[in-house]
């Protein structure tokens, strides 16, 4: 790993050298910016070798005579981008498409080697975007060679003839944001990609992959698996974990079982295609659809019964395709004999024996079908009765809890009273603006890289005291501006001498993975060596992105300077914080806990996406006196006795408590300056929840009046009370908190939709 060694010339000679070199440096920086540096000869040779290995496709003809490939104007066939003398982006599109050449034998000769191709590409270590489309490349994907391209953010190998299994090494391309391998001949099980925390697009369509449904990370927004051999049920994690999913296409597979109805209510979902599978059963009448959902295709399955209200027809805002099922209230449906056996196959075992049982066996099957139909019908009737009873009980018994539990909840929710309908309304304009932060699903984060000490000295004006923003026992933090104009924060930390270079490497590898859209991400580091012993690192600088749109508190209180957040925006910000905490608690084992989850440390970017700016960086887990500790390889100032070992016991619950305080301020718009004020506020909220939820409107921030559903406000208030419980064991897990916040947002969106519909009806009347 690159290290920078601090020089130690005399102050006088250093100043003189700086004065002499300054004009030269200024001229050099003006004449030869980083982006205009000539391409390294090794990189140029690698590009020419790629051309030869692909047997001189017309798209690469320009490389033959170009003095500088980086200066070539981009075309649909070829695009090369460079930085600092290295290729950072390579896009080649050929004409050897499988649609025109069904067999790989007609594409590239038998002497072609996919291993040799990717071995050559691995000589471009700065490559962040690689697209090789329609080039006739064939053979297995060499995982070991692909893994060398650690800077890759986008990989597109579509419309080729690659075959065999997907290599597990793909799961180790940790910076990957987009992976497109569509229209090849890949087969077998997809390796788990859940560790790719930044993967936003996965397109494996039109291969032969299966049967297990692939595991992906929570950041995926576009998932395309059409035209494969995936079978079984749609996993519950697709509904429970992929909260940022916008585009889902699993058509043309062999998926069976019931459709998880909650899939249509995923908050960011716009397009879903479940067609041409073997999905069966009924869609519940209570199925809800997200407001952003514009296209639904469930055609050519075995679905029965009546369609839910949000899927009953097309409109200007939503297209729904349902042909080829057995819906009772739709046209172009299959005969009942087609759907019934398939639907029952999801719950009944296949027939046994050789099929020679005659009438007796047919009678037994008929009896089984009759019994099964009676059971299903009875169950539906009982469920309907229970819904009616529960609704009446909620009206008659205010002590029934409003707060739903997540599917994995283990902490009991406190009691709350039912919410009455608010008398104020939200306008359509407010509704469109309400969930802006929640619906922004992608956020570009600069690639992680190693910086030099000289770069950081220039960015911080030689670590000038005027750029010093914060000093703690562990670090000093400086404002900085890189050569490209981007603002950064530079954290200076002194290393503990007892840690080995190997431990430092492991630590920095962990640091490079702490990248999440709801964290202020660390984008690089610089290691500085000891002056007396260059082989020993003395300090580390961590470089973070700079978010300059203010803190969450400033958006709640400084209404003259910033946009005042309405209730839906506040819930969206809270959901973002919860997701950030969830990431920290699960990204390592043990998780990163005891973070400084303070409302001043929650920053909002220009899209109002919330980001946790100050979180711990644990290194090594140790056990002392039967308790687990997390150590970091940094020294603290001598006048501070905090040490570097932190007790992990109840650390996650401490984060939950701090988050509860943020929720209280989100509700009231005011901080609690003392423990007595906090207890008084909790008592008021508790009384309002149990006696009359409408009293919450008097406690809530006047700035959000008329923008919230009372039930949504009740839910968040109840979460806040649970999070700030005195005993850590009484506080919920972050998974429970996040699930209930998302429920609150769904309630809010439903209320906003109904209010907008009411306004529309009134205006037409």
Image (cartoon, helix red, strand yellow):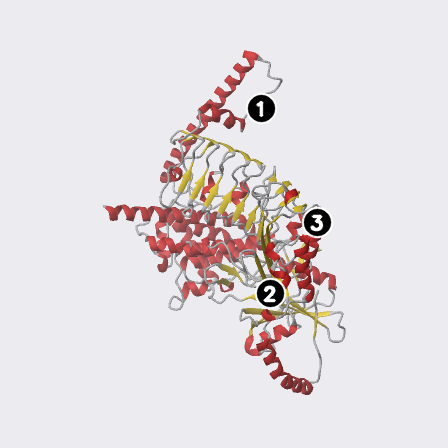
Q: 105 left or right of 366?
A: right
Mark 2 and mark 3: Cα distance apart in space: 26 Å
Where does residue 462 sit, x and y in percent of width and height?
A: 61, 78
Residue 140 is tagged as: none
Q: Secondary structure at mark 1?
A: loop
- Name which of mark 3 and mark 1 comes first in the sequence: 3
Q: Is residue 651 visible?
A: no
Viewer-closest of 229 and 266: 229
Q: Is residue 173 visible?
A: yes
Where does residue 64 sit, x and y in percent of width and height?
A: 64, 61
Q: Which quarter of the rendering shows the C terminus?
A: top left
Q: Which residue lies at the image location 55% right of the left edge and 78% below the top edge?
A: 466
Question: Dot 3: few (<14), some (14–19), or many (≥20) neighbours within 10 Å?
Answer: some
Q: Secondary structure at mark 3?
A: loop
Question: Dot 1: few (<14), some (14–19), or many (≥20) neighbours within 10 Å?
Answer: few
- Name the residue carrying label 2: 70
Where does residue 689 sit, x and y in percent of width and height?
A: 40, 49
Q: 335 left or right of 510?
A: left
Q: 521 left or right of 265?
A: right
Q: Residue furthest top?
A: 359
Quarter occupied by residue 9: bottom right
CB within 8 Å, label 2 to label 3: no
Q: Is residue 176 above or below residue 372?
A: below
């Amino acid at each position: 790993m690159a290290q920078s060694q601090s020089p130690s010339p005399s102050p006088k000679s250093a100043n003189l050298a700086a004065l002499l070199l300054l004009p030269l440096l200024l001229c050099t920086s003006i004449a030869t910016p980083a982006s205009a540096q000539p391409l390294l000869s090794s990189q140029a040779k690698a590009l020419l070798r790629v051309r030869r290995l692909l047997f001189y496709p017309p798209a690469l003809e320009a490389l033959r005579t170009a003095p500088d490939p980086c200066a070539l104007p981009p075309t649909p066939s070829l695009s090369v981008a460079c930085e600092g003398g290295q290729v950072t982006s390579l896009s080649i599109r050929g004409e050897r498409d499988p649609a025109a050449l069904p067999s790989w034998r007609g594409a590239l000769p038998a002497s072609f080697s996919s291993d040799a191709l990717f071995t050559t590409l691995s000589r471009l270590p700065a490559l962040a975007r690689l697209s090789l489309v329609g080039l006739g490349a064939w053979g297995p994907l060499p995982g070991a060679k692909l893994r060398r391209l650690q800077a890759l953010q986008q990989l597109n190998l579509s419309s080729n003839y690659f075959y065999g299994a997907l290599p597990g090494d793909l799961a180790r391309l940790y910076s990957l944001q987009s992976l497109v391998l569509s229209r090849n001949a890949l087969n077998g099980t997809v390796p788990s990609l859940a560790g790719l925390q930044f993967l936003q697009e996965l397109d494996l369509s039109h291969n032969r992959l299966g049967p297990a449904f692939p595991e992906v990370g929570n950041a995926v927004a576009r998932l395309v698996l059409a035209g494969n051999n995936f079978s079984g049920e749609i996993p519950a994690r697709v509904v429970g974990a992929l909260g940022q999913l916008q585009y889902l296409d699993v058509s043309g597979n062999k998926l069976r079982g019931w459709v998880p109805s909650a899939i249509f209510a995923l908050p960011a979902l716009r397009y879903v295609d479940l067609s041409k599978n073997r999905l069966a059963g009924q869609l519940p009448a209570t199925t809800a659809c997200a407001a952003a959902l514009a296209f639904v295709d469930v055609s050519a399955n075995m679905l029965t019964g009546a369609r839910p209200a949000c899927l009953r027809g097309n409109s200007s805002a939503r297209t729904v395709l349902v042909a080829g099922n057995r819906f009772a209230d739709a046209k172009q449906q299959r005969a009942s004999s087609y759907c019934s056996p398939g639907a029952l196959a999801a719950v009944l075992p296949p027939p046994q024996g050789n099929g020679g049982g005659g009438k007796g066996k047919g009678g037994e099957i008929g009896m089984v079908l009759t019994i099964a139909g009676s059971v299903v019908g009875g169950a539906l009737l009982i469920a309907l009765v229970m819904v009616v009873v529960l609704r009446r009980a909620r009206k008659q018994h205010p002590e029934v809890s409003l707060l739903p539990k997540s599917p994995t909840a283990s902490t009991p929710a406190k009691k709350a009273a039912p919410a009455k309908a608010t008398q104020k309304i939200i306008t359509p304009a407010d509704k469109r603006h309400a969930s802006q932060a929640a619906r922004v699903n992608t956020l570009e984060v600069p690639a992680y890289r190693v910086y030099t000490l000289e770069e950081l000295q220039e960015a911080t004006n030689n670590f000038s005291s005027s750029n010093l923003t914060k000093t703690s026992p562990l670090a000093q933090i400086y404002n900085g501006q890189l050569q490209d104009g981007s603002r950064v924060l530079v954290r200076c930390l002194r290393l503990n001498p007892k840690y080995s270079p190997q431990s430092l490497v492991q630590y920095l590898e962990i640091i490079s993975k702490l990248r999440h859209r709801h964290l202020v991400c660390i984008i690089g580091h610089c290691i500085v060596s000891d002056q007396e012993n260059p082989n020993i690192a003395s300090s580390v600088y961590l470089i973070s992105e700079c978010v300059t749109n203010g803190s969450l508190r400033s958006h709640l209180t400084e209404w003259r300077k910033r946009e005042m957040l309405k209730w839906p925006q506040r819930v969206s910000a809270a959901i973002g914080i919860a997701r950030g905490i969830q990431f920290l608690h699960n990204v390592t084992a043990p998780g990163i806990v005891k973070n400084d989850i303070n409302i001043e440390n929650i920053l909002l970017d220009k899209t109002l996406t919330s980001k946790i700016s100050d979180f711990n960086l644990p290194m090594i887990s140790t056990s002392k006196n039967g308790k687990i500790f997390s150590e970091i390889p940094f020294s603290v100032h001598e006048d501070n006795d905090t040490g570097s070992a932190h007790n992990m016991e109840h650390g996650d619950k401490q984060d939950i408590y701090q988050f509860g305080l943020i929720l209280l301020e989100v509700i009231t718009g005011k901080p609690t300056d003392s423990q007595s004020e906090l207890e008084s506020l909790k008592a008021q909220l508790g009384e309002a929840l149990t006696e009359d939820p409408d009293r919450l409107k008097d406690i809530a921030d006047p700035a959000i009046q008329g923008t919230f559903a009372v039930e949504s406000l009740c839910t968040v208030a109840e979460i806040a009370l649970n999070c700030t419980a005195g005993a850590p064991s009484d506080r919920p897990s972050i998974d429970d908190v996040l699930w209930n916040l998302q429920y609150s947002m769904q309630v809010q969106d439903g209320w906003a939709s109904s209010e907008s519909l009411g306004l529309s009806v009134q205006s037409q009347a």
